[in-house]
């Protein structure tokens, strides 16, 4: 059987595992139940398994037995994130989350099941594997810097030498079934804007005797949106969204402080720095104008998730050959979401691939997106992801040298961003 056929045969087992993980989601770097499920699912396979010290990560190394003609044995890394998000699930599924306020609303349970499937497919083909494969089961992707923690603990060198390439899949609940790729920037960098406006409290009936931080914060929020549209080129993507704003205790009390937080997404480090400088200048100016003070910090978080063009071309060719042209879909523009797989790709070449997991019959225009409590992901993509992971590892370890850049057959609708966008 082909790898794709064997992956389809594993589908029922992978579905059960995914549902088990889905019912018991965990957040952050401490995922003891998830870690235990992964270790159990890997048991019996010819793997060198190690557990993280600062997080409940799992690293498994599969050593191929096929000879490498060049003499050099490459190592390839495959990543799956395992953590959930702080969202109340509202899907009504029979296997919905049993933990209040926590759900696998970003599809990481699918990623984990897919990589387990790939481990089984590859273990059965050790005689065909011309190098080693590092399986990276990562906690803490959702803002907890799990990738950085695993890198610091040596995941990139788990095979005894630095991996030559790294690949990851990410499912999307509103994209039709298929693999979406692009060279260059795949996802944006992320930064945080953290603001506390300090006024003077008082009685709401006499606001002139106070220094109302709420109205100042409201002006700041609107001014930040105007700043983005008037200070940055419309062809240079920048998103600034205030996602949290808190102030006050009672409607008849002017509070002393107002606090808000914003996320900033860009495709360039230099633009991110410009946003930070402009925002801080703007906030201090508004605070001064109203006789208040502001404590504001701009914090750089994750870099751009950068798909190395040669590795992306290799991924494209693999998808087309294994799954056919219909399932390979060039992506016109990057996603403005951020991913800490960017930490891995800043160290070694590789690519992140988007996998559409829209349920059959659903309308992509109205399907709830990732992180929604109503987001749904189709189990039918589990064998697709497992098969692609396995095929990438098998094919990439056959050659000690990186794949050549050949995108002639890939009609990407937009050019790759300039090298400056790379972290």
Image (cartoon, helix red, strand yellow):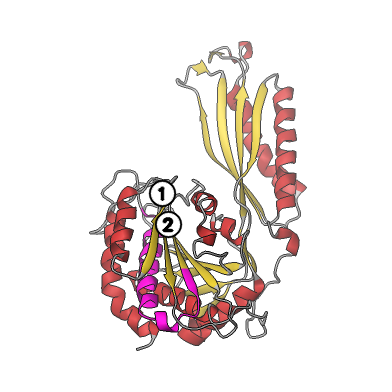
Q: State the residue at coordinates (61%, 13%).
A: 210
Residue 100: mark in rendering: none
> For mark 1, does the 10 Å Cα neighbourhood hold few (<14), some (14 to 19), or many (20 or more) residues?
many
Identity of the residue drawn at 56% across and 26% down? 258
Relative height, residue 386 to residue 56 (above, below): below
Tell me, yes or no, whether the highlighted magenta stretch contains residue 125: yes
Indicate whether residue 309 is drawn in magenta: no
Q: Which circle's residue, 1 or 2, is located before the other in the chain?
A: 1
Q: Position of residue 335 (x, y in %)?
A: 58, 61
Task: Kindly identify the residue that appears in the image at 33 percent across and 51 percent down.
Answer: 25
Q: Is residue 391 visible?
A: yes
Q: What span is colored magenta in the figure? A: 104-133
- Circle 2 sits on which residue? 106
Q: CA distance from mark 1 to mark 2?
A: 7 Å
Judge by depth and name the residue closer to the eye, 250 or 58. Answer: 58
**Residue 256 picture location, percent across and down:** 56, 18
């Amino acid at each position: 059987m082909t790898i794709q056929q064997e992956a389809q045969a594993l589908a029922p087992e992978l579905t059960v595992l995914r549902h088990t993980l889905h019912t018991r989601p965990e957040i952050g770097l401490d995922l003891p139940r998830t870690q235990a499920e992964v270790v159990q699912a890997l048991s019996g396979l010819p793997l060198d398994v190690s557990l993280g010290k600062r997080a409940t990560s799992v690293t498994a190394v599969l050593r191929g037995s096929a000879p490498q003609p060049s003499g050099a044995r490459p190592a390839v890394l495959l990543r799956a994130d395992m953590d959930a998000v702080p969202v109340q699930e509202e899907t009504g599924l029979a296997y919905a989350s049993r933990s209040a306020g926590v759900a696998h609303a970003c599809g990481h349970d699918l990623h984990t099941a897919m990589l387990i499937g790939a481990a089984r497919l590859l273990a059965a083909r050790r005689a065909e594997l011309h190098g080693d494969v590092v399986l990276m089961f990562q906690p803490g992707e959702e803002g907890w810097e799990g990738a950085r923690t695993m890198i610091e603990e040596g995941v990139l060198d788990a095979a005894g030498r630095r991996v030559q390439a790294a690949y990851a899949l990410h499912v999307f609940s509103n994209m039709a079934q298929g693999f979406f790729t692009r060279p260059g920037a795949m996802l944006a960098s992320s930064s945080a804007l953290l603001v506390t406006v300090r006024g003077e409290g008082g009685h709401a009936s006499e606001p002139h005797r106070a220094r109302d931080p709420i109205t100042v914060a409201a002006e700041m929020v609107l001014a930040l949106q105007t700043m983005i549209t008037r200070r940055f080129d419309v062809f240079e993507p920048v998103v600034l969204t205030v996602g949290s704003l808190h102030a006050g205790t009672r409607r008849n009390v002017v509070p002393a402080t107002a606090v808000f937080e914003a996320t900033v997404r860009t495709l360039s480090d230099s633009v991110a720095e410009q946003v930070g400088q402009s925002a801080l200048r703007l906030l201090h100016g508004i605070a001064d104008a109203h006789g208040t003070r502001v404590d504001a910090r701009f914090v750089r978080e994750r870099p751009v998730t950068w798909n190395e063009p040669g590795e992306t071309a290799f991924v494209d060719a693999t998808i087309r050959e294994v799954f056919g042209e219909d399932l390979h879909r060039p992506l016109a523009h990057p996603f403005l979401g951020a991913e800490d797989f960017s930490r891995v790709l800043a160290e070694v070449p590789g690519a992140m691939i988007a996998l559409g997991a829209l349920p059959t019959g659903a309308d992509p225009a109205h399907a709830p997106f990732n992180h929604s409590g109503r987001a749904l992901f189709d189990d039918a993509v589990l064998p697709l992801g497992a098969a692609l992971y396995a095929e990438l590892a098998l094919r990439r370890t056959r050659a000690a040298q990186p794949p050549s850049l050949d995108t002639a057959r890939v009609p990407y609708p937009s050019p790759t961003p300039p090298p400056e966008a790379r972290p």
